[in-house]
C-alpha cells in the first residue's frame, strides 16, 4: 500500500485557513482520511489469482469550547474483503483534550478518548459474525504549530482497558498498551485574516520536499520520504520503509529511489509523474531451542516497481496538498519456493512539507 504523508494518517484530506489566533475559543479542528486500495495476488497453494479491495473513510471534527479545552469525535467506516469474505468495521471515538501550557508555538496537553468499534464478518455460506471492542485511553503530548492553521502533534496514547466480545459473548478484558503516534492537525479559526497573495509558485533547485509517516507501539512502522529539486521540475529522492512487530517477531526493511517530474511550473496546481524501484527484506526472529538464543533471519525479499501520476497544489509557501494514483508491482522471492507476484492499485491525498 502506497502512502506519502507528513506524520499523518492514511490518505489525509484537510481544510485550513490562516488567521491571527491558534487555539482560541470557537476554533474548529478538521481532519480525516479517505482511501481506496485494490490488490491482486496468487492464492496460497493454488494457481489462481485473488483480488482484495479496501475502502475507508474517517472524518474527524473537534471544537474549542474555551481557549484551553477541546471536545470532539471521529467516525471511521471501512469495507474490505477477499473473494466471498467481507469485513466491515465501524468505529466511533469521543475525545476531550486540555491544553494546559504554551511555550511560543508549542502547546502541551492531556486528555482522554473512548472508542466503540463493531466489526461485521460476512461470508457466503456461513452465518454473519460480529466482533465488538470498547476501549478507554489516557493521552498526553504536545502540539507544534507549523503555521497558523497547520500543527504537528506528538501523542502518547495509553490504553487503560479494552473489552472485546465475539457474537455478544465471551468477553475478553485487556489493556496496558502504550503507543507513540504522530499526526497533523488542521484548524479553522473563528476569525478570518486575509492571506497575502502568492505570486511565485515555482520550485527552485535546492528546494526539498519532505513527507512520511510513523507509529511506535504495537505494530511499529517508519516511512520517511525526502526529495530534492534539481531544476526544470525534476526531483530525485528516497523512501525508507521499515516495519517491526516485536510480539510476532517479524520485521521489514527496504529502500526505494524515486524520480519525479513536475509540469506547469508557473501554476499553483501542478501535474507530476513519478517512477520508483526498490528492494525490501522481510525478516523473522528465530529462537534456538538448545541455546535459548534469538537471531534474525531473512524470510523473503521483495522487488517492487511503481508508477504514480499526481496533482500538487501549494496551500502555503511551505506545504503542498497532493492527489495521486499509484500502480505498484511486487515480486516476492522465498527460499526453496517459487516466486510470487502481486499488483497493487491505490489512490489518495497527501500533505508534504516544502523546505526552501
Image (cartoon, rainbow, N blue to C red):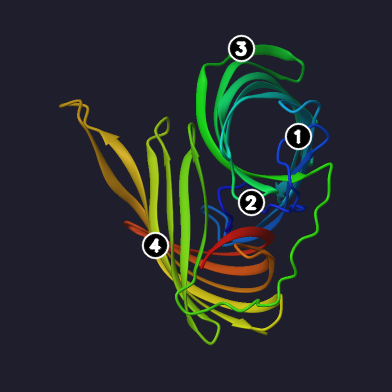
Q: Which label's residue is closer to the chain start, 3 or 1?
A: 1
Q: Residues within 10 Å of mark 1 (few under 14, many from 20)?
A: some
Which secondary structure, mark 1? loop
Residue at numbered disc 4: 255
Q: Position of residue 321 (x, y in %)?
A: 68, 63
Q: CA distance from mark 1 to mark 2?
A: 15 Å
Of 61 and 63, the residue lying toward us: 63
Q: In the image, 304: left or right of 8?
A: left
The residue mark sitting in front, 2 or 4, is 2
Which secondary structure, mark 3? strand
Residues at discs 1 and 4 in contact (Cβ within 8 Å): no
Which secondary structure, mark 2? loop
Which image quadrant is residue 273 in?
bottom right
Residue at numbered disc 3: 173
Q: Which label's residue is closer to the chain start, 1 or 4?
A: 1
Residue 24: give its label: 1
Q: Which residue is the extreme one toward the bottom?
A: 232
The residue mark sitting in front, 3 or 4, is 4
Q: CA distance from mark 2 to mark 4?
A: 31 Å
Q: In the image, 83: left or right of 184?
A: right
Q: Which label's residue is closer to the chain start, 1 or 2?
A: 1
Residue 147: give its label: 2
Q: CA distance from mark 1 to mark 4?
A: 43 Å
Q: Position of residue 280 (x, y in %)?
A: 39, 59
Q: CA distance from mark 3 to mark 1?
A: 39 Å
Can residue 324 be seen here? The reply is: yes
Taking the spot 59% from the left edge, 23% from the top edge, the residue there is 139
Q: Position of residue 285 (x, y in %)?
A: 31, 38
Q: Which label's residue is closer to the chain start, 3 or 4?
A: 3
Which secondary structure, mark 4? strand
Q: Residues within 10 Å of mark 3 (few under 14, many from 20)?
A: few
Q: Position of residue 123 (x, y in %)?
A: 76, 40
Amino acid at each position: 500500500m502506497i502512502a506519502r504523508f507528513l506524520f499523518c494518517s492514511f490518505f489525509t484530506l484537510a481544510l485550513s485557513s490562516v488567521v491571527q489566533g491558534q487555539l482560541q475559543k470557537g476554533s474548529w479542528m478538521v481532519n480525516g482520511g479517505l482511501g481506496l486500495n485494490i490488490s491482486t495476488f496468487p492464492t496460497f497453494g493454488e494457481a489462481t489469482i485473488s483480488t482484495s479491495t479496501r475502502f475507508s473513510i474517517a472524518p474527524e471534527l473537534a471544537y474549542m469550547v474555551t481557549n484551553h479545552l477541546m471536545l470532539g469525535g471521529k467516525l471511521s467506516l471501512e469495507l474490505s474483503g477477499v473473494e466471498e469474505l467481507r469485513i466491515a468495521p465501524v468505529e466511533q471515538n469521543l475525545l476531550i483534550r486540555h491544553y494546559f501550557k504554551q511555550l511560543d508555538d508549542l502547546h502541551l496537553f492531556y486528555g482522554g478518548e473512548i472508542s466503540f468499534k463493531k466489526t461485521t464478518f460476512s461470508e457466503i455460506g456461513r452465518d454473519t459474525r460480529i466482533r465488538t471492542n470498547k476501549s478507554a485511553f489516557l493521552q498526553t503530548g504536545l502540539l507544534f504549530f507549523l503555521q497558523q492553521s497547520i500543527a504537528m502533534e506528538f501523542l502518547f496514547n495509553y490504553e487503560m482497558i479494552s473489552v472485546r466480545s465475539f457474537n455478544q459473548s465471551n468477553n475478553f478484558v485487556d489493556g496496558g498498551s502504550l503507543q507513540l503516534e504522530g499526526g497533523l492537525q488542521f484548524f479553522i479559526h473563528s476569525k478570518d485574516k486575509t492571506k497575502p497573495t502568492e505570486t511565485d509558485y515555482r520550485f527552485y533547485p535546492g528546494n526539498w520536499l519532505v513527507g512520511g509517516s510513523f507509529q511506535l507501539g504495537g505494530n511499529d512502522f517508519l516511512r520517511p520520504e525526502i526529495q530534492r529539486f534539481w531544476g526544470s521540475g525534476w526531483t530525485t529522492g528516497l523512501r525508507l520503509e521499515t516495519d517491526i512487530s516485536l510480539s510476532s517477531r517479524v520485521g521489514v526493511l527496504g529502500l526505494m529511489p524515486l524520480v519525479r517530474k513536475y509540469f506547469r511550473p508557473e501554476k499553483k496546481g501542478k501535474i507530476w509523474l513519478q517512477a520508483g524501484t526498490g528492494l525490501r527484506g522481510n525478516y523473522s526472529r528465530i529462537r534456538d531451542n538448545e541455546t535459548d538464543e534469538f537471531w534474525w533471519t531473512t524470510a523473503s525479499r521483495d522487488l517492487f516497481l511503481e508508477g504514480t501520476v499526481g496533482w500538487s497544489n501549494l496551500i502555503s509557501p511551505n506545504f503542498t496538498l497532493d492527489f495521486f494514483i499509484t500502480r505498484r508491482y511486487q515480486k516476492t522471492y522465498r527460499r526453496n519456493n517459487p516466486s510470487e507476484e502481486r499488483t497493487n492499485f491505490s489512490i489518495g491525498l497527501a500533505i508534504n512539507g516544502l523546505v526552501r
